[in-house]
Amino acid sequence: MKRIAILGSSGGNLYNLGGKEPLKLLGEIETQASSAGIKIAAIQFIGAKASMDNANESTLSRLYTWNSSEENIVFSEEKALKEVNGEAKKVDSIIAKMIEDGKVQGLVLMSSDPEGVNNLSIKAAAKKDIPIVGTGGTSMATIQSMGGKVIATSGTTGTTNRTRAVAAIQSLSRHWGLKYKPVISSSGKSSQNLDENIFQRISFRGIMMAAIPGFIAMSIVLALSKIPGLAKLNDAFDLLIKGLPVVVAAIAANQVSGLDEVGIVAGVVAGMLSIDGGLIGGLIGGILAGILAFYLIQLALRWNFPGTTANIVAGGLSGLISGLIVFFLISPIALSLGNGIRYIIELALNYNSIVAGAIAGLLIWPAIIGGVYHAAILPIVLLEMEKTGASFLGAIDMTGLVMVSAGITLANIIYPKQKSESAIAVPGFLINIAFGTFVEASYPFMFSDRLIFIGAILSAALSGVFVGIFNVKGTAYVPSVTAPALSNNALGFTISMIIALVSSFLITLFANKISRNKRNKEA
């Protein structure tokens, strides 16, 4: 098994590109090394509180090292940089001895100091002719002049902790003939192989859930634009609508690629070119960008591109290619699909909004319990909001789920079956009212009592009837007291919400009373 030492510092330019978070930077290298079957033998890394371009002897810093017995990263207390450098030189001599003894077979350098605190280690590495990889143009050039066997070097511009780690370990693995596949890290440990799981990471639910804040922001701007004197916000609303595909594309590319900022850049580029395709166009563009970004960075590194160039290829070229595919080929189809879904909903509402509301309310609880809500209904809610800032199904969500859950939990606060249930119900009620989410808080009560379960479905259907009567369009995921203001009919939405809460509250009270009476008789 090959063993490496990681040397360097938080750097100058590196400081602003991940170097100021040494644990993440070092943890990412550890993760990628583990995927290749490479062990960490030693670490000597100086993490300063400022860029080394501006640091001085008194700048607070820490020395990060490797605990070989526990196999984890440890760090010192914060001290002046001058003092930390003194400690680092001691570690440097230890690592140099390890290299001389054959206990270290490779070096990974990040903004190292070959003429200072890393001098002995690098001289030993040059003498033993072991492979060296790393970033820091000036320092790596100095190492080559010292006779170091530099097999891969790169600047830091445009790179991230993950892509630097992937580039370093891929170069070492290729040099040693080791099998290596990049992985996603979790708390410094490998969690999943990136390319083996890349298509499994395409999660419409995850992408849409992450995009919700953008849609809520749009709704807030729309509501504010209705206030006298703030009509100019209509222009901001129109701009936000155009930007939504970019938001979705960036999230999709980041999640699918697993490359952090590189994936985000790819998604933004693809999203800007996918605007004409609407939300679906942005979604497709982002997913394509994420897939391309991952495979392009692997290809670029395999061809020995510097890390900076590999990042530019992955982030820029993948976004451009996928965006142009959507722009020229997919946008018209995606736009038609989105418009078609909205048209079907509008058709149902125009035919009989009351029946449509009742059916939607009746099915909303089975949908969320069965896992259909986040996979199918939520994307439709966001598709509706994409054009108007509010949604028919979004209103059903708030009335049929959030307010019904609030009614159930409120009843269990005031008149629970057992006193202990009141404490369970309080957080659920407060979160539903304050944040417009966490409908799962009512599950314990619904699943333990068939009458409460039926009451929840009937209350949701009843509130849906009133949503249909008032032709309400709104959203959940906002405080319940503000939800009516973000709808197209504040009074109608308020009435529908109150009906949902009161209905579920009364049915739950009735169910709890029956349960209490039954228990008292048995006692």
Image: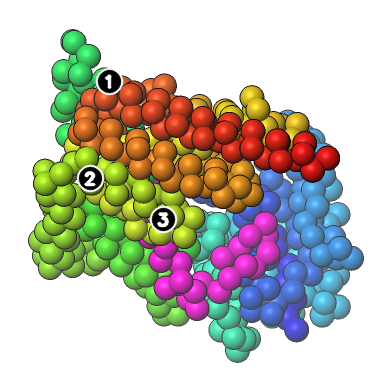
Sequence-wise, the earlier of marks 1 and 2 is 2
Residue on which disc 1 sits: 491
Depth check, front residue: 173 or 359: 359
Q: Measuring from the top left, give residue 43's x and y in whole percent.
A: 76, 60
The answer to which image quadrant residue 110 occupies is bottom right
Q: Is residue 154 above or below residue 510?
A: below
Please name the amino acid that badge 3 sits on. Answer: Ala
User: Would residue 470 be found to the left or right of residue 133 on screen?
Assistant: left
- Quote the CA–CA distance across marks 1 and 2: 20 Å
In the image, residue 231 sits, relative to residue 67, either above or below, namely above
The reply to whether discs 1 and 2 touch (Cβ–Cβ < 8 Å) is no
Residue where numbered disc 3 is placed: 367
Outermost residue toward the top in this view: 229
| Residue 263 in the image: above or below residue 383 | below
Asked which secondary structure carries label 3, the reply is helix
Per the model, the C-alpha gap separating discs 3 and 2 is 18 Å
| Amino acid type indicated by mark 2 | Val
Residue 113 inside the magenta-drawn segment: no
Q: In which quadrant will I find the C terminus?
A: top right
Q: Viewed as shown, does residue 239 lie left or right of 290?
A: left
- Mark 3 nearby-residue class (10 Å; few <14, some 14–19, many ≥20): some
Q: Position of residue 191 (x, y in %)?
A: 62, 67
Relative placement, left or right, of 230 versus 493 is: left
Residue at point 70%, 77% (across, down): 38
Q: Which residues are magenta?
A: 184-211
- On whether residue 195 falls in the magenta region, the answer is yes
User: Which residue is denoted by mark 2 in the rendering?
Assistant: 355
Q: Are marks 3 and 1 in contact (CB under 8 Å)?
A: no
